[in-house]
Image (spheres, coloured by chain):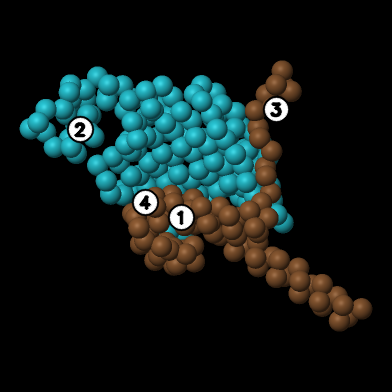
Amino acid sequence: MRRPRVMSFDDYLFHRCESIHRLGGDVDIAMHSAVGAADTVIVEARVGFPDELELRVFEVVERTDEGAAHRFRYSYQVRWRRQLVVRYERDPVGHPEMPEHKHPASGGRIPWAAVRLATVVDEMWEEYRLRIEAPPVTGTESPRAADEPRRRTGA
Amino acid sequence: MKLARRRRRPPVEALDHEALAEILRELEDAHHDATGERLTSAEFYDLYRAGEADGIVDAIRWASYYELYREQGRQALGRKRVRKDSLVTA
């Protein structure tokens, strides 16, 4: 079985920025810590793509005692034309009963294994493709159905 | 090549107590603008801890900055105590 890769705190921050820049969109990224608490860093990024497709990245990264990076919290959110497409979160304080979860476009919160940013990006492009290929919403369909092109197209 | 790559990583900006308070004020105002409800960050955090902040936009962001703010306040208090103690023992 493949063991998860352990990355140092500093390397993680560097590679996280690299991976966000490599997405190719219009990147706005910032990293914050608190004075006197450099072992916790908040990474915030907004990546804009054409056609109002947007990826928002929020991570709270902690340095472990061994100097490794630990994603204590994350939120990866995809929006298209200001509507939520999907959001994945790790929130062990707000939802200790379900730390890792997914907020689908249809609403609610469902348990979901920890995700990597690359996986979210893959899903973003797939969902975008499905949305732009979906037939126009007719008057007989509910607004919720419009949020779920995968189900409508049977893909 | 390495230099060009390194330029891509912004420096980690260390925020002081006032800067963190400013971010929290912005989050409080954004929540008020979005919902009409005025919540202090401490009140929000109580809701968040109770698992009742699902409907609040940016809840994770708000909670994270509030935790940083609170942690820094504790540390500042600790530093003051150390200084006071060192004066006593000097």
* Residue highlighted by disc 3: B6
Residue A64 appearing in the image? no
Q: Residue at x 67, y 44 (%)?
A: B13
Q: Which chain is brown?
A: B
Residue A111 versus residue A82 in the image, above or below: below
Q: Secondary structure at mark 4?
A: helix
Say which label, 4 or 3, has the lower sequence index.
3
Residue type at tag 3 = Arg
Residue A119 versus residue B60 in the image, above or below: above
Say which label, 3 or 1, has the lower sequence index.
3
Q: Quadrant of the N terminus of chain B?
A: top right
Q: Position of residue A91 (x, y in %)?
A: 45, 53
Please tell me the numbered disc located at residue B34.
4
Please tell me the numbered disc located at residue A148.
none
Label 3 crowding class (10 Å Cα cut-off): few <14, some 14-19, many 20+? few
Q: Secondary structure at mark 3?
A: helix
Residue type at tag 2 = Ala
Q: Quadrant of the C terminus of chain B?
A: bottom right
The residues tagged by marks 4 and 1 sit, at their Cα atoms, a distance apart of 9 Å
Seen as rendered, the residue at the extreme bottom is B88
Of tags 3 and 1, the one toward the viewer is 1
Of A94 and B47, nearer the camera is: B47
* Residue highlighted by disc 1: B29
Q: Residue at x 35, y 44 (%)?
A: A102
Do the residues at pointers 4 and 1 share their chain? yes
Seen as rendered, the residue at the extreme left is A140
Q: Are marks 4 and 1 in contact (CB under 8 Å)?
A: no
* Residue highlighted by disc 2: A146
A17 to the left or right of A54: right
Do the residues at pointers 1 and 2 share their chain? no
